[in-house]
Amino acid sequence: MPDNVTSMDALQERLSASPFNDWMGLRIESLTEDEITVSVRWREEMISNPAARYTHGGIIGAVIDTVADFMIAAKVGMPVPTVDIRIDYHRAAMPGDLTCTGRIVRLGSTNSVAEAYLRDGEGRLVASGRGTYFTAAARKD
Amino acid sequence: MPDNVTSMDALQERLSASPFNDWMGLRIESLTEDEITVSVRWREEMISNPAARYTHGGIIGAVIDTVADFMIAAKVGMPVPTVDIRIDYHRAAMPGDLTCTGRIVRLGSTNSVAEAYLRDGEGRLVASGRGTYFTAAARKD
Amino acid sequence: MPDNVTSMDALQERLSASPFNDWMGLRIESLTEDEITVSVRWREEMISNPAARYTHGGIIGAVIDTVADFMIAAKVGMPVPTVDIRIDYHRAAMPGDLTCTGRIVRLGSTNSVAEAYLRDGEGRLVASGRGTYFTAAARKD
Amino acid sequence: MPDNVTSMDALQERLSASPFNDWMGLRIESLTEDEITVSVRWREEMISNPAARYTHGGIIGAVIDTVADFMIAAKVGMPVPTVDIRIDYHRAAMPGDLTCTGRIVRLGSTNSVAEAYLRDGEGRLVASGRGTYFTAAARKD
């Protein structure tokens, strides 16, 4: 795996410049050569079912997709388009902040695979997933 | 495939009661025994990249997940938890309303599979996907 | 969608030249501009569980992957590498020949998406799936 | 995560009793509370393309599916049906034995998620994937 080419501050700036990522309150908590950890600031509009009050699966998927992509961004200099993604839902995410950790499975010049794991405030695994990212887009930039 | 057990109005009421689905402006445009069509009202906060201005993949995934689930809801009486989902991104979705059509691939008593196709205002396929849904939850309700 | 560039005979020749596809007894039954149908010749070694005698999920996945890929081959001239695939298992496939139909969801110059549906001798849906295929490989050939 | 309830020998017996798993020459090399490692004995019929001679993606998917399932079998007493699976192909697998390691992502009473990583003789990652498994089937046995 090559070294990171983007700093945590530069990645945060890019993350916050995205209206929807900003809406979700995504904040990079740590970044190493192998792993990125991002927090999600819960908000009322994230709720799926008004009675059960758990977080919408689409928010969960959006976070996993973004966090996996931003670990790739650390290596290639920018987030790249998602080709496809799989999300597994392990338990309902009740209101409260979440933490998501991303890792690269395989970095390729055209397509890459990265994964992410989302945990609730008690550290329980809420969801996880993996996607294919079009890393060739970073070379065109 | 069994007949629908839920009317379009009842499904719309359930859809709008969900804070995040309401935030996305989801509106059921039509419902038959085989297919549901839902429109998405674009909003500025849905943007991913502020320069390119395309819609965030997480929004796209959220719509596909919800629409597939609501076709199942038409058959079993309520939306049910997503077990896992795959989303394929076919082209960038530029600002503007979107339309998503859902169908059931296989209805089972424990797990079911449904798919959805998302199109932009010119009818171009933007994304599609399929998920596994925990239909057993509807029996417990 | 562009026209087919490969004939059914040429595709069958390519299919049969592949040792594992030949082992599975894959035979193209029909090919149109939109759809390919392939039959699978059942054999004892395809069994997963010796007591229940249903077909191994890996065989089912191999068929779906191959059939989706060969519909792409009809359009781009050759089968191309699978980037990733999702398989959904709908019911156990008991001993007997199977039939699989493939379609393209979206043909792209770098990555494409195709899907396939596998049915048993009574026409029941046994499994289905969709994969991302690296169509750029066909241009290099 | 609960303790294993099945020994390596009992799992190997179950694995070898399956005609297709036996055809693939699957052998459990090690089993801990967290991980199972299985070797694959290469054979000529596993080839996809006769010129390039790499292993068929269907074989690779079959191995990943089986190995993920057998780590679940160690916990629940038997392999259980695959609900759905995603396979990512990272590089061509050239002729030669392969080694696959499986882990559980989340063990549930109805559905569980497990993943596996397949490496070639030089330790290079060839493919990986994750599936949903119907663990409720083990309770009925």
Image (spheres, coloured by chain):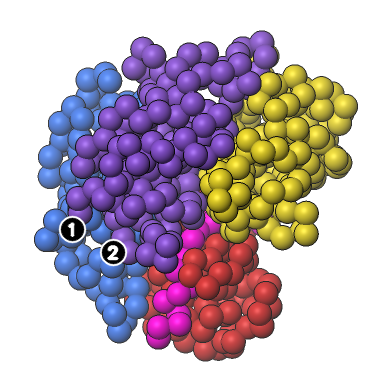
Chain colours: A blue, B red, C yellow, D purple
The region drawn magenta spans B122-141
**Mark 2: few/some/many CA within 10 Å (<14, 14-19, 20+):** some
Q: Are marks 1 and 2 in contact (CB under 8 Å)?
A: yes
Which sits in the foreground, D5 or C8?
D5
Look at the numbered disc 1 and give the secondary structure of its residue: loop
Q: Is residue A121 left or right of residue B107?
A: left
- Residue at image location 68% in from the left, 58% down from the top: C125
- Residue at image location 49% in from the left, 26% down from the top: D25
Residue A99 percent across, percent down from the top left: 18, 53
- Residue at image location 72% in from the left, 53% down from the top: C119
Which sits in the foreground, C24 or D78?
D78
Which residue matches tag 2? A91
Mark 1–mark 2 Cα distance, whole angstroms, equals 9 Å
Task: Find out whether residue A103 is within the magenta segment.
Answer: no
Mark 1 on the same chain as mark 2: yes
Which sits in the foreground, C66 or C71?
C66
Residue D106 percent across, percent down from the top left: 29, 53
Which residue matches tag 1? A124
**Residue type at numbered disc 1:** Arg
- Residue at image location 85% in from the left, 40% down from the top: C29
Q: In the rendered view, would you say A55 is above or below B122?
A: below
Look at the numbered disc 2 and give the secondary structure of its residue: loop
Mark 1 or 2, nearer chain start: 2
- Counting the numbered discs, the total is 2
Locate the N terminus of chain B by quadrant: bottom right
**Mark 1: few/some/many CA within 10 Å (<14, 14-19, 20+):** few
Instruction: Please give the chain letter of the residue carrying mark 1.
Output: A
Residue B6 percent across, percent down from the top left: 57, 87
Q: In the rendered view, would you say D24 is above or below D129?
A: above
Residue A19 percent across, percent down from the top left: 32, 54
Which sits in the foreground, B58 or A18?
B58
